[in-house]
Amino acid sequence: MGRLFGTDGVRGVANADLTAEMALGLSVAAAHVLAEAGTFAGHRPTAVVGRDPRASGEFLEAAVVAGLASAGVDVLRVGVLPTPAVAYLTGVLGADLGVMLSASHNAMPDNGVKFFARGGHKLADELEDRIETVYDEHRTGAPWERPTGAGVGRVRTYDEGFDRYVAHLIAVLPNRLDGLKIVLDEAHGAAARVSPEAFARAGAEVITIGAEPDGLNINDGCGSTHLGPLKEAVRTHGADFGIAHDGDADRCLAVDHTGEEIDGDQILAVLALAMRERSALRSDTVVATVMSNLGFKLALEREGLKLIQTGVGDRYVLEEMKEHGYALGGEQSGHVIILDHATTGDGTLTGLMLAARVAQTGRSLRDLAGVMERLPQVLVNVPDVDRSRVATSEELAAAVAEAELELGTTGRVLLRPSGTEPLVRVMVEAADIDQARSVAGRLADVVKSALG
């Protein structure tokens, strides 16, 4: 069996790759592994279980709940809520485990299982590895130890989760949003109720699109992966700006009043300046990945802020933030982590904080986002090459050095082997898009010849 856990839980086509049997087995395995690790010592364990609106989430939720209860874990079912809401509730309710059923921005046929540790933090890699090992052992026939009688877990619905999470979002806002007209695209996903409620309670005039989930339409031509409908709605309604989430609402992207896209780098830049003004940006530092636009780095330098870059994936951003106590980090894709108020990327919180900055300054989002200029970025995927030799090829190193010399201080090159496919990603940024395309094309040719 290949490794089940990716960078964000276990995902696959629901009822094909990710079956009810697997969801149940992983949940039982998680309960046993956490018990072995001492997480449940001295008390009766509790888990929070939530999901996005995918149709498959209904039977997968039933399987997870059954697995946990059969292993002696009491379960609080919070229903359809965003991933960050499940993480928040896991922490605030003192639960030993959180489980979210979602495939985030993926298409509807997919689904996923993500586990949170006590406090609402992502499960450590070594615990995921152990869960996978234990699951595989029992999948092939080893019997479980099963509680009986009063030892089995009890299951109840926790409807208060919705209001408790929304109240948390409102409580951490630095100011109200009165006077703003905002379009929200909820991707027919997990934030379809939460996000409009939070923005409205904070004082904004809210117009929603993509807020009618039916179990089948999640991420379908809407949300953060399809910004066209949001751009049109913002212009049609004369809104100040628009916010887009993905299916589980851990991402936030935006468009300004003209329909121009505002990506995660720009959102981070705006929030960094706002947080510094409130003395909330610890060490005047922002954490982002190596895929962040060079324009972001240059903007932070110009503003006297520091940037620390990690590998690609919000979990690596979070690890760096937690290790050194940084308050703000994220990705160009819209995963933004505000660690004082969330343990994971939170799209609704990010959108609210962005709106609060617009309301507080009286400036347009377009003006605020102008703090950074996005340099043209070209990404070329080179398939069917030996990605393991990227770091050792002298021919490739020479070509990269030549490209970097040509680009100077207003451009950069990043060659990265894919973590999941037999290909190498060539990313080039330059002040001019034609130059970026030219350099990327030449480097892609060298990758083919050197690693093919």
Image (cartoon, rainbow, N blue to C red):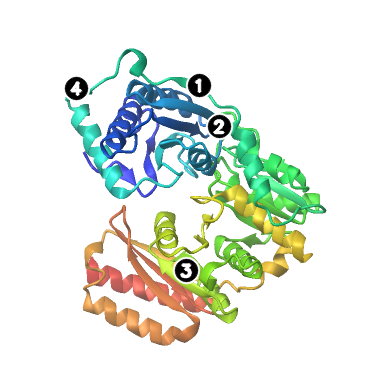
Which circle's residue, 3 or 4, is located before the other in the chain? Answer: 4
Q: Position of residue 178 (x, y in %)?
A: 80, 52
The residue sitting at 37% across, 37% down in the picture is 12
Is 136 left, or right, of 204 in this rendering?
left
Q: Please, what is the three-letter code of the amino acid marked with disc 2?
A: Val
Q: Please, what is the three-letter code of the amino acid marked with disc 3?
A: Val
Screen quadrant of the C terminus: bottom left
Residue at image mark 3: 378
Residue at image mark 2: 80
Screen quadrant of the N terminus: top left
Q: CA distance from mark 2 to mark 3?
A: 37 Å
Residue at image mark 4: 143
Is 36 left, or right, of 364 in this rendering?
left
Q: Please, what is the three-letter code of the amino acid marked with disc 4?
A: Pro
Q: Secondary structure at mark 2?
A: strand
Q: Is residue 290 visible?
A: no
